[in-house]
Image: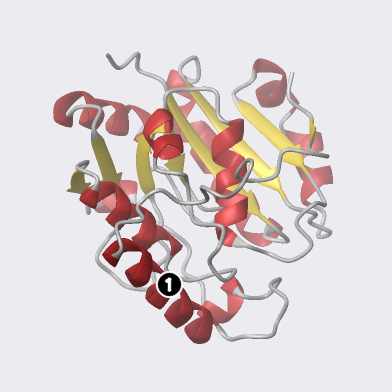
Amino acid sequence: MISGWKIIWKTCKNRFHQIRETLPENLSDNKENKNIIEFILVDFGSTDGLQEWIISNFVEEIESGYLKYYYTKELKYWHASVAKNTAHILANNQIVVNLDCDNYTGYRGGIFLIDKFKFYGINTVIHQFSNNVGDGSYGRISLFKSHFLQIGGYDENFKPVGYQDTNLILRLWISGFNYIHLADKKYNRAIANTKEDGTLYTDGREKWIEMNMHNFRYSKKNITSGKLIANQSKEHIGIIDNIYTFSN
């Protein structure tokens, strides 16, 4: 049974220039339902003024629990799967949504998704991709947190960026989950980034196209051999130590 809870989460490192555009609008667009929605922002060591801006401008949202801000320096180099897994673990509600820092929910986007899950059922993964490759919306994936954990989350054995979203969707789909593609432009707007933007804080040894191809091949090998649950050799997924919060 769906209780009507939804989580929107973001992860970032030095993306203040985007967060200052998306976060205020997203909080405003969902404030009518803030009793059943939480925004989780995980900051992986930003040095661009993001922390100071959050603490100075969102005291009420943090105190109410509507916005939960976490900070850690444990991720030396950017790794998309580790970052996304960390945010999912910190989520408290039933439904988790991968809302990247450059994405907008749309007006009452939380209730929009809750209604879709009520219609399609809980064994569903919703993909809010606009069909415009490169516009920043491809990673918008929603599902129940219990199912996310059941499938092992995003694969942390991947290279830092590339193909992690497709891999998650494929593993869920092959495992029997109902895949729903929603391309409603009112709810999947995003600030476009280049592939170079996505690799800025990795270790810099490989380009995005190289990492994406490696991850594609690794994913294909695992799926072909029936390995649908990721990270089985790990004690936990994401970062669980030395995470500091300004939540209530």
Q: Is residue 178 above or below residue 217?
A: above
193 displayed left or right of 18? left
Of 151 and 104, nearer the camera is 151
149 displayed left or right of 245? left
Residue at position x 30%, y 33% from top? 113
How far across and down, in percent of the image, does residue 58 sit? 71, 31
Q: How many marks?
A: 1
Of 113 and 22, nearer the camera is 113
Residue annotated with mark 1: 218
Q: Which kind of residue does numbered mark 1 sit on?
A: Tyr
How far across and down, in percent of the image, does residue 206 sit? 62, 85
Residue at position x 80%, y 35% from top? 55
How far across and down, in percent of the image, does residue 80 sit? 57, 60
Helix, strand or loop status at disc 1? helix
Tell me, yes or no, if residue 107 can be seen here: no
**The N terminus appears in which quarter of the rendering?**
top left
Residue at position x 47%, y 79% from top? 214
Residue 29 picture quarter: top left
Q: Is residue 22 above or below residue 158?
A: above
Q: Residues within 10 Å of mark 1 (few under 14, many from 20)?
A: some
How far across and down, in percent of the image, does residue 120 sit? 16, 31
11 displayed left or right of 213? right
Tell me, yes or no, if residue 105 can be seen here: yes
Residue at position x 71%, y 59% from top? 13
Q: Is residue 121 above or below residue 128?
A: above
Of 85 and 150, nearer the camera is 150
**The C terminus appears in which quarter of the rendering?**
top right
